[in-house]
Amino acid sequence: MIIDGLQCGHFDRKSFESLKLAGVAGVVVTCGFWEGALESLDSLGAWRDLIGENADIAAIAKTPADIVSANEAGKVAAILGFQNANLLEGRIRLVEMFAELGVRVIQLTYNNQNELAGSCYEAEDSGLARFGKEVVREMNEAGILVDCSHVGNRSTLDAIEASGKPIAVTHANADSLFAHKRNKTDDVLKALGQTGGVIGCATYRNITGDAYCATLEAWCTMVARTVEIAGIDSVAIGTDRSHNFTAPDYAWMRQGRWTRGVDYGAASAARPGKAPPPEWFPNVEDINVIPQGLRSVGFSEEEVAKITHKNWLRLYEATFRKSET
Amino acid sequence: MIIDGLQCGHFDRKSFESLKLAGVAGVVVTCGFWEGALESLDSLGAWRDLIGENADIAAIAKTPADIVSANEAGKVAAILGFQNANLLEGRIRLVEMFAELGVRVIQLTYNNQNELAGSCYEAEDSGLARFGKEVVREMNEAGILVDCSHVGNRSTLDAIEASGKPIAVTHANADSLFAHKRNKTDDVLKALGQTGGVIGCATYRNITGDAYCATLEAWCTMVARTVEIAGIDSVAIGTDRSHNFTAPDYAWMRQGRWTRGVDYGAASAARPGKAPPPEWFPNVEDINVIPQGLRSVGFSEEEVAKITHKNWLRLYEATFRKSET
């Protein structure tokens, strides 16, 4: 069983077919980046339609038990997530309502500072701001997992401290293994490990580096080194893979409505386009080579299970709301 | 037990205390008139806060069973309703989501024509429009009661026809008993009666008339005449009583953002202000005289029970969504 801590893009039937073929039981899908409340409701509506139209092979999971039962029924479970807090439009009371509508993961910031926290790309990471502290507490209560993947390291440490429940970095790598603003410093990874949090190791080339992308064994070695920092209970997979992404999607993701200029996100002016996938991971269904790769670098069966799904399931159990009422 | 099919205004603890004192088990509260989707989420948030702060004497009811159990626990049940479809902002998919957030009654139009239907104050009632037909069907599916109180007679007949479930006129009177644009013609009342729908007889002076407001017996005589038109299973109470309403609230309710001028709603230029309550119903807790008034004009105990609560409970059972999932 594999659970992927983050994917994005325009899913279609083929996406679910590929994920099913790969043995992916569940995936946190990105329902929005810069969308406000109403646009986010539209996105949730579109996701309901998509899942409804593919109900034979896909399901929306609101609990870890939903993921397991979807998997047993031969379906891929979509866990609804947002990569930004714009859906809240500054309103604390919307946290609970979006939870009731099925949202289970919210990233505190995307690439820019917002009312909640500082992002990884800001010159100065403010730390968790007043509204951010309120939202983290509210997410704890409402049963939504706090995601800090694009959040600055200082704000992430603040979020770990402020949260009454463990948090996630759903898709990033260790900065000490591949230096990049999007990656997390060792103190963040250790704090995650000490509090039951989980980092999903990414396969996105821009934040993984060519060396770790070259072979499956190289990437799994990176995972093993991340385990040395964060601990075996706090490392999982978060590929950051995208489905059917085209230039306008990258423009929206990176520039939203916040700039008239160009922003490269995790890419750079020197390499602005779509980063090629790792050599060992050309198509999303190739994710199923990861368990064998983890074994080949020395992980036991139980350790492989933790990295591929058990750590996410435990974290979801600790953080997702228990029921719909 | 009394259920009031519609009240509005700014509820506070004293409102619930008064309603509890009056033996009101449940009341459909107005969460919005002209508010869009986000403003409506704000309103729902405020209602959650209000009920949470007064949880010893109030509760939000999502099912008729919730009303009964709230009443047994000595609490007043608030059923969340909107007097307009603006909360949908033209989006069919929001019907289900607002249902999941607890909304149980939506009026298709307020005083103005909208994308759904024609209103009672338009020179020409278009009948149920394309989006209106979609929304009625979606409300049937999602478990929200269709309310046509301010909707034009033609559109109301269309809604009765289009709806797979009985509908309501939560707060209006018979036009043949007191002629007013807000009141319903006999063909509408008969169609309601033939389809299991319910009209809540209003006590709002502007649409009830001074004669029926003069004494309890006069008003109960109006109810008895309404029963002769619609049938004993289709007549209930919908006072249209407001709590803590002041001039700016009337301005918002009547003018919203749609005019730079003045609109009088059910009032008139000759009598523009707040209409005085019926002589027999000065304060909301005086609603508890109604059962005795109904007996005095000849209704049996069973008939009194139907008018005061059983007809609403039956309609809610037929239309409200069954569960939260």
Image (cartoon, coloured by chain):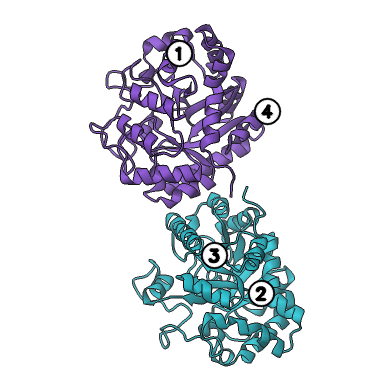
Chain colours: A purple, B cyan
Residue that label 1 marks: A224
Given this view, does label 2 or label 3 mark the residue nearer the observer?
3
As drawn, which residue projects farthest toward the left?
A: A123
Q: Is residue A74 at all visible to an observer of this figure? A: no
The residue type indicated by label 4 comes to Glu
User: Are there few (<14), some (14-19), or many (20+) residues within 10 Å of tag 4?
Assistant: few
x%, y% of residue A147? 42, 34
Distance CA(mark 2)–CA(mark 3): 19 Å
Say which quarter of the image contains residue B249.
bottom left
Q: Is residue B15 at all visible to an observer of this figure? A: yes
Residue at mark 4 shares a chain with residue at mark 2: no
Distance CA(mark 1)–CA(mark 4): 29 Å
User: Are there few (<14), some (14-19), or many (20+) residues within 10 Å of tag 3?
Assistant: few
The local secondary structure at tag 2 comes to loop
Given this view, does label 1 or label 3 mark the residue nearer the observer?
3
Residue at mark 4 shares a chain with residue at mark 3: no
| N-terminal label among 2 and 3 | 2
Residue that label 4 marks: A72
Above or below B58: residue A150: above
Chain where mark 2 sits: B
Given this view, does label 1 or label 4 mark the residue nearer the observer?
1
Given this view, does label 4 or label 2 mark the residue nearer the observer?
2
Chain where mark 3 sits: B
The local secondary structure at tag 3 comes to loop
Distance CA(mark 4)–CA(mark 3): 44 Å
Residue that label 2 marks: B1
The residue type indicated by label 3 comes to Asp
- Tell me, yes or no, whether the two marked residues, 1 and 2, touch with CB atoms within 8 Å: no
User: Are there few (<14), some (14-19), or many (20+) residues within 10 Å of tag 1?
Assistant: some
x%, y% of residue B76? 58, 69
x%, y% of residue B29? 53, 68
